[in-house]
Amino acid sequence: MKTIKDRLAHLSFRRACQLLGPEGETLLRRGGKHDIDIDLQVNWRDDLLRVLIGRSVVEIKAEGEQQGLRLRCSTCALPCEHQGAALSLVLEEKMALGLSAPPPERTPVESLSDTELIERALMERLERARVEKMSVDALDPAAPWTDYTVTSKVSGKTYRVALRGLERGDSFCTCPDFRKNTLGTCKHILHVIEAVKPRFSPEQWRTAYEPNHIFVHVHYGEDLELRLVAPSGLDGAAGKVLRPLRNRQITDFRELLHGVSRLEQLGHPVTIYPDAEEYINHGLFRERMAQLVADIRRDSAGHPLRTELLKTALLPYQLDGVAFAAGLGRAVLADDMGLGKTIQG
């Protein structure tokens, strides 16, 4: 009898759709939008795979002989998006899940320089871009610099690629790998470039991307940077607002938001992309936390939160410890037993 790993190793997109019933393809695509951390959310047992998705637990179990599989969701009685997410993960990440053979052994990672590590990571993504089957649809087929929809023919997952240049960091993809890898590219961007490059002349590729609207985005590379991009030719009052903001790293979030408000008052709509909005909100939160932490640590004995935060009044050093940990986001509190580390946590 084949094990659960044997069966999942041979799982195809078509078979996954069959397991989910008449709405299988839709559930797979919706489930594919979930970001799943394999180390934290996936657990193997002898006869099943368990995946944590939000508050739901999906189990995939071997059943019968050959390729039989049974799915169960802890919160849904019928085939659901959570089951689609688990199957989509299997289709997309067979190597990471140990369901397919790793590539031939190469030079150990610890022996490589930073430059060599980056080159290896780029080559791995280029290889996957060339080998994996994907479909590409252009928002504007007449121009190279446009948005593309990229769909994996293996998992059914779909991502948006905004192609804005051929160099690393020029373009954007909605896939999780792009946001995390600090390379400024991914297999989807590389696949789009190779797929559409023959469609346009060298002159068209040499013509730089020219934005037709104002937008705020996150530039992905070794470090994340918030940037504002605007069409050329905007002058007068709008140009004055744009001058200190455009095409450079933005660190003053309040100045940016004031500038966006002013531009919209002048009749120039500004698009703030979702990842940029999240970046701004996180930055503003850090600023508020830093101010609150500074206020508390300036006088932890006299701060009102010492008696108001919990039902039990905190000692000054305990409130100081709370502020210290909250300000960092995560920290290790180390002191003698009995001094209140639990209450500070």
Image: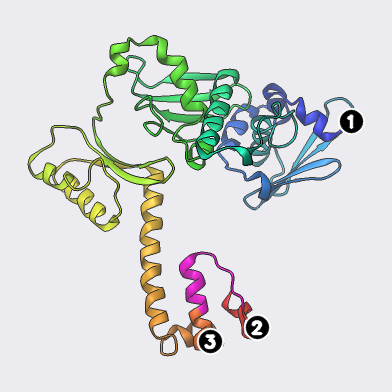
Picture quadrant where residue 289 is located: bottom left
Within the image, what quadrant is residue 334 found in?
A: bottom right
Query: Which residue lies at the image location 80% right of the left edge and 35% below the top edge?
Result: 70
- Badge 2 amino acid: Asp
**Is residue 331 highlighted in magenta?**
yes
Image coordinates of residue 301 in percent, x first then y, are 44, 89
Residue under label 3: 314
Query: Which label was assigned to residue 64?
Result: 1
The residues tagged by marks 2 and 1 sit, at their Cα atoms, a distance apart of 57 Å
Kind of element beneath mark 1:
loop
Q: Residue furthest left?
A: 236
Q: Is residue 225 left or right of residue 29?
A: left
Q: Amino acid at mark 1?
A: Gly
Circle nearer the N terminus (1, 3) = 1
Query: According to the image, label 2 marks what residue?
Result: 336
Q: Residues within 10 Å of mark 2 (few under 14, many from 20)?
A: few
Q: Is residue 258 above or below residue 11?
A: below
Tag 3: Cα neighbours inside 10 Å, few (<14), some, or many (≥20)? many
Which segment is the magenta one?
Answer: 321-334
Q: Quadrant of the C terminus?
A: bottom right
